[in-house]
Image: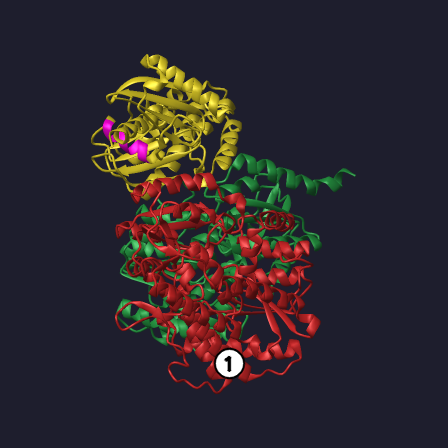
Amino acid sequence: MFDKFKEWYTNRHDYAKDWKKRKGGKVLGYFCTYVPEELLVAADILPVRILGSHEAQDVTEPHIFGMFCPFCRDCLAQGLKGRYDYINGIMISQSCLHIRQTYNSWVKHIPQEFSYYLYMPHGVQTPHAYPFLHGELEVFKNALEKWIGHPISDKDIDRGIEIVNKNRQLMKQVYEFRKQEEPPLTGLEAMYMVVSSQMVDKEEHNRALEEVLKELPNRKLNRNTGTRLMILGSEDDDTEFVEMLESLDSTLVVDDHCTGTRYFWNEVEPQEDRLAAIAARYIDRPPCPSKDWPERKRFPHILQLAKDYNVQGALVIQQKFCDPHELDMPALRKMLEENGIPTYFLEFDVTVPIGQFKTRVEAFLETFALPDLF
Amino acid sequence: MITAGIDFGAKNVKMVILDDGKIAGRGSTLTGFDLKIAVKDASEMALKAAKLKLDEIAHITETGIGQGSVEFAADSVSEVGANAKAGVKLLPSARTIIDVGAEEARAVKCDESGDMKDFVVNERCAAGAGAFVEAMSRALEVELEQMGPMSLKATEAVPMNAQCTVFAESEVVSLIHAQTPKPNIARAIHDAIAERVISMVRRLGITEDILLVGGLAYDVGFVDAMKRGLGVEVHVPEFPEYVSAYGAALIAQERAKE
Amino acid sequence: MAEIKYQTKPLDIWNEGKALRQQYYENYAKAHEKGGIRWAGGAWAYSAVPAGLGDDVWSLTGEPYGASVAFDKKFAARCHEAIEAKGFARDLCAYLRNYLGSIVLDEYVFGGKFPKPDFQWTTHICCSHAKWYQIASELEGGTPLFCIDVSTGLYQDFDERRREYVVNQLLDGINWLEKITGRDYDDEKLIQAVYNECEATSLWAEICAMNKTIPAPLDEKTMYSLYVFGTIMKHRPEAVAFYRKLRDEVQVRVDNKIAAVGNEQRRVITDTQPPWGFLEVFRYLESYGVVSVGSLYTFSLIGAWEVKDDGTWGPKTTPQEQGIDITTRRQALEILADWTHARPEWQHFYSAQKKSDMMLRIVREWQVDGVLLHYNRGCEGLSLNIAENRLAFKEAGVPVLPFEGNMGDEREFDLERTKKAVDSFLELLGVK
């Protein structure tokens, strides 16, 4: 029943090309989940998050300094290799430096009819961020209208908010099932679900989610749940790793990834001023570490997730060279361990040494079995 | 006129003696710990081959990592400068010369007179080329000389992390544990190095003809990986590891005339 | 070796600068002895704002502090070990590791214990700034922290609405400063600090612009020791006084063709912070008559620039030169925000093209023959877009040498390899 998500994820380019043919709409490639998809959906544009392909490549070295993260490199490689040749435009919502580098190189070397850098504020904890982002969304909306050639009405925006909100609600409902003692879905399936929602038509994705939700209450997985783990870190769509992990008597029950909960956790709360409502949603969402200051608001959120999902241990993963996460990690691990949740750290690259990681994760999982010996 | 070039590599010291521009003798020895001994051995070997004495050489130019250690050298030139000069002499149509040695890779773009136009050297994270193949041959329990021919027998391309040799090494271990056939692993190793080198060369831009030199150019598996990765013909001269020394000798000849 | 063509002499003001810098770090360390206030934050922090708390307010800015640590390689290595032992990654900002390592060791690079600030006050433009002081605050047991988001985009887009975002944060910041220090805020002192900052940063640009002359009156290695006042006290009267004097002295050098390097035969620029422990690379270049006359970094990390009527870059006209009378807190903050966001070195956080254009402008106007790009593993903020800048130089036919290193962690800099690459570059420039 999760096959549809896997299929979309695997054949993302075919899907988008087909969508264009079917709907005759524009496709916008985007970086970072701070992009306000509501406005894109309102404009009948298909937002497609640019992700890597986890393959070795030799085309980005002229453009990206070697100590920038493997993810930003992998993304640019997809563009330079022409795999996103069907997109009509590209945009970024301001986040970390590394993905910004990818955007900068992309607009320079891969010509687009529309490109946009949204000045998403970093200071999401100051009250002044709300009017600031509100203003940025107005400027962005104007740019979109100019591109598509017609105005985006309040009604359109309402529809955009409704569709995207529904997608969030449905995915959250699916996540609810992961709280069960024997979750009826694996972490891998959940990963396919969320990542595919970043690349397909939200209405189609919603329909698939509704189907899944009908069947989930009666679904039984013929597997042992084992140790309940959460996975924390930056972008992560390393399905090979998750598959290996869940073959080791463990289940991923929740995450804090931008390819997971950070992407969909909170909704737009309707207000008369639609753009203010959208702005508030992005200011208030579970933050990327690059925006989580001066207070650490991400930590209590993570701890709450750990409690709600009855987490036994946490895998803290990061894209190699990802500074925002590296800056959070020591304090994050300390916080979790003080709360009785052991952590294990793994550094991800474009590909991971799966055999070596298996040995390490096995050792980590063994620590949960130890008390039973006595 | 007799001139010579001497090249300090990470692994070997190489010397080439020219008699009116024609190669009269070559010598090579392990760099080892004592550079002076290495210089003495390599030069004696080259002099013996050329049937010459040291004082008969009009001008000696050195290149490579240990510059300044040859007491009898008149001056020095960079490896990329030497490669440009030698590359065009060996293959007049060559415009990009890629040099892959034990530890470092470098590439130079040049004009028809063998003058350098631009160059690149590998970043630190991408260090380790020939030495990596050597270490991996031990991990695979295969003779070093067999690594190339064996990789040509690969039946499948196995993807491997190409950015960093430390990571790549642990991937090789994973592949061994997964009982991947040795030829496929050997190819993955060559592909990974080729990919790193090509990444670097792309910074220069790929301008044909391409000449591949340095010790790793002996490895047919690596040459094959370079051809596949670049998608264009890759030429390899005879005695590829002597190219820098040969270039230094050619420059010595120019400088002696000045 | 290149022949000596020009007369040269050391700067008269050199020792005065050295003393001023030393005095500053001492004033910070000893502030509490005289009832003064200490704060810490980034070199790009709005330092004029805490100045409204009084004349006895001293700051410790993290980046120049990190650079000072880098000069002491042994101490830097101990800082790195100390902070890595706390679980921090070694690829993080090298200044940050030098600074946080000092807190963990409880040692000040200028001697004594690490002088803990009374509060942290910083801006956030790269991924590390606010996080740096968040961690510093935690390591120090909870020093109060205020961070101002300045990631409002390119200056060409810095309209009133975006400026308001910054100004409103600063106004909040002033209330916060009053609350945590218990002092009344003096707007007159703020206004004076704004005038000072505008003048000091404009003067620095004026000094850098004099380096367009051949022979260059200053070399970049020397400029590193001079721009530092803009990073530690850009709002203070001492900085203004020093730069006025320096400007006059450099003018005399220009008028009398006094060179920084007597054998100048080729001019280069660099980019990003240098590997501080290895400035001998510059001396090596100079031995072949190759002089670094500056960089976008050295010119505009603090320098305030504008395009003059003839289309070239020159010092930005200050509010006082424009006859603007600053009378209110809000007006002072608006002027300061506008001034700050025009900073050239901030533009490249948003656009590779903008940075390439600015660097190519420097190549033209400063009569530059080649460019050295430091692929600085210690600072991702300033290395952002560096590979694209390299491509832009190639396209423009400007010889360029990328070399890898780290501004503050010597483990990542290979002097011999770099010298070898420099040799090849010298051959390319036709001087070796």
Chain B: give its colour: yellow
Identify the element where label 1 is drawn: helix
Q: Which residue is mark 1?
A: C192
In the figure, B106 relative to A206: above or below?
above
Q: Is residue A183 visible?
A: no
Residue C84 placement, left or right of C305: right
Residue plotted at (26% across, 50% down): C397
Q: Position of residue A363 (x, y in %)?
A: 64, 38
Of C1 and C370, the residue lying toward us: C1
Residue A137 placement, left or right of C186: left
Quarter of the image for residue C108 reads bottom right
Q: Position of residue C39 (x, y in %)?
A: 61, 69
Residues shaded magenta = B81-89
Of C408 and B150, the residue lying toward us: C408
Residue furthest out toward the right = A374
Chain C: give its colour: red
Q: Is residue B117 visible?
A: yes
Of C89 and C50, the residue lying toward us: C50
